[in-house]
Amino acid sequence: MKSESRETPLIQNLKAIFVLLIALVFVISLMLFKNLFFQSAYLLKSFGELSVDPEIAFKNNKPTFLEFYAEWCEVCKEMAPKVSNLKEEYDKDINFVFLNVDNQKWDKYIRKFDVNGIPQVNLFDKKGNLISTYIGKQEEIKIRKSIDQLKEEVKSTEKVVNAEFSSVKENKNHELTPRSHG
């Protein structure tokens, strides 16, 4: 009997250690996954901060990549790593402009380019002529081909709409209501 009573606490301790190990692996996995998940949101936020001003972009005699996005847009988050790759590769030759549709400062451009789904990528030649428009989720290779054509100054206007996009929400932050204390 004595040996059975000694084994029981030993087995209980082993079970407790096993459960703690599983919990530790789970917590570490969750932390790694969290970093991967939030990387896209961080990239979107950094795009806006590192963006070339659109007024400068359209006047500096370089082709321009213009993306309309929002930080809440799941498709924008999904495309952010691909766009980041393009930016790293072509940053010296092309202006990269990122305009957050939730910022009313960009309202003029949102209307001018008829943005009603995001992400929306507009590609312009070095003279500021609109060459391609991509709305929704796109393959990196497709955008890359269009960028290469921009660099080669190939003239072809194209509009590509993918069913996977987010509708632009009307920004009502600037509207006055009786409760807004105006």
Image (tube, grey):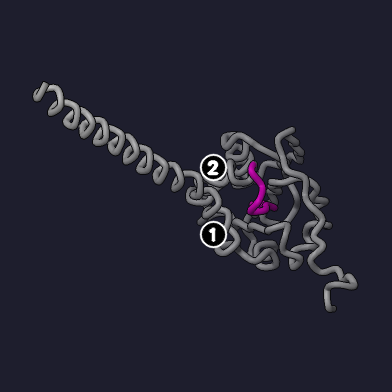
* Residue 74 percent location from the top left of the image: 64, 43
Name the residue type under label 1. Ser
Residue at the right extreme of this rendering:
178
Mark 2 Cα shell of 10 Å, populated few (<14), some (14-19), many (≥20): some
Q: Which residues are magenta?
A: 65-74
Q: Are marks 1 and 2 in contact (CB under 8 Å)?
A: no
Q: Amino acid at mark 2?
A: Lys
Identify whether 84 is placed above or below 175. above
Pick whichever, 104 or 67, lies toward us.
Answer: 104
Image-quadrant location for residue 11: top left
User: x and y percent of residue 78 in the render?
Assistant: 58, 41
For residue 145, which quarter of the picture? top right
Residue 110 shown in magenta: no
The residue at which mark 1 appears reads as 46
User: Residue at horizontal 70%, vertical 67%?
Assistant: 55
Q: Which residue is mark 2?
A: 82
Residue at 66% across, 67% down: 56
Where residue 171 sits: x, y (%)? 79, 60
Q: Is residue 99 above or below residue 20?
A: below
Query: Which residue is drawn at the image coordinates 55% and 63% (left, top)?
Result: 50
Q: Secondary structure at mark 1?
A: helix
Q: Secondary structure at mark 2?
A: helix
Q: Nearer the viewer, mark 1 or mark 2?
A: 1
User: Is 72 colored magenta in this rendering?
Assistant: yes
Q: How many marks?
A: 2
Q: Quadrant of the C terminus?
A: bottom right
